[in-house]
Image: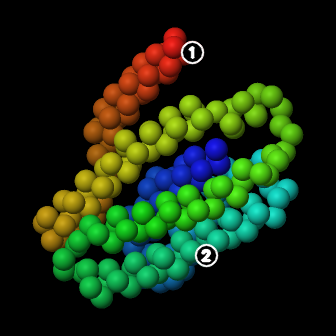
Amino acid sequence: MVILELVLAHLLGDFVFQSNDLIHRKYQSWMGVAEHVCIIAFFTVLFLFPFWQHQYMWQAAGIIFAVHFIQDLLKIKYDIKFNAKKKSTVPFFLDQIFHLSLIAYLAPGFETLTPLSLPTWLQNLYFSQFLTIYLIGLILFSFTYDITVYQFRRQKEKKEKEYIPDFVGMRKRLLLYSVIFVLGLLMHRSLV
């Protein structure tokens, strides 16, 4: 299910590898947006490596790059013009919904494509839904959760505070998530 790899690439680019400095550069110039979208494109292409031989993979990566670029430019313009004082979370959530909707739209195009012939260990690793879901969960319960809480705090206080990651809270959530995931995996294995 390529949709999981595309979601993982998105989460890495939009949450883990988007620093405060990069966010500031995005609001200063379209070059910052381009830098951010290149990170998204890098992870997208990297995680779709078994499909590099197909034109559709390159088209999908190009569409993700172009739409993400335009969407982020529009979001930044909206934030500067209409959301500077209000600090509403609506643009943040709409932005994520639109990004994930595009991924959901493009992912089915990969179902008919034949992946490259890979060594068995790499094929098992790449196509392991459990591993991909685990990695997505790690990001959701660490950076994504932390940044979402920051967005709500920013809206409540109506101040522009710089995002400071709560690494202690992240570690606790990651440990809890990992324990629950492993227990769920063990239960699944025992039922199969």
Of callouts 1 and 2, the N-terminal one: 2
What secondary structure is found at the residue carrying circle 2?
helix
Q: Residue 132 vs residue 181: left or right?
A: right
Q: Residue at x 30, y 55 (%)?
A: 148
Q: Residue 50 vs residue 106: left or right?
A: right
Q: CA distance from mark 1 to mark 2?
A: 43 Å
Quarter of the view holding residue 23: bottom left
Q: Residue 136 vs residue 144: left or right?
A: right
Amino acid identity at mark 2: Ala
Name the residue that disc number 1 marks. Answer: 192
The reply to whether residue 148 is visible in this rendering is yes
What secondary structure is found at the residue carrying circle 1?
loop
Quarter of the view holding residue 167: top left
Q: Residue at x 23, y 71 (%)?
A: 88
Using the image, determine if residue 159 lies above or below residue 190.
Answer: below
**What crowding class fits label 1: few (fewer than 14 Cα within 10 Å), some (14-19), or many (20 or more)?**
few
Place of residue 114 in the rendered image (x, y in percent of width and height, measured from the top left) = 82, 47
Name the residue that disc number 2 marks. Answer: 66
Place of residue 62 in the rendered image (x, y in percent of width and height, measured from the top left) = 68, 70
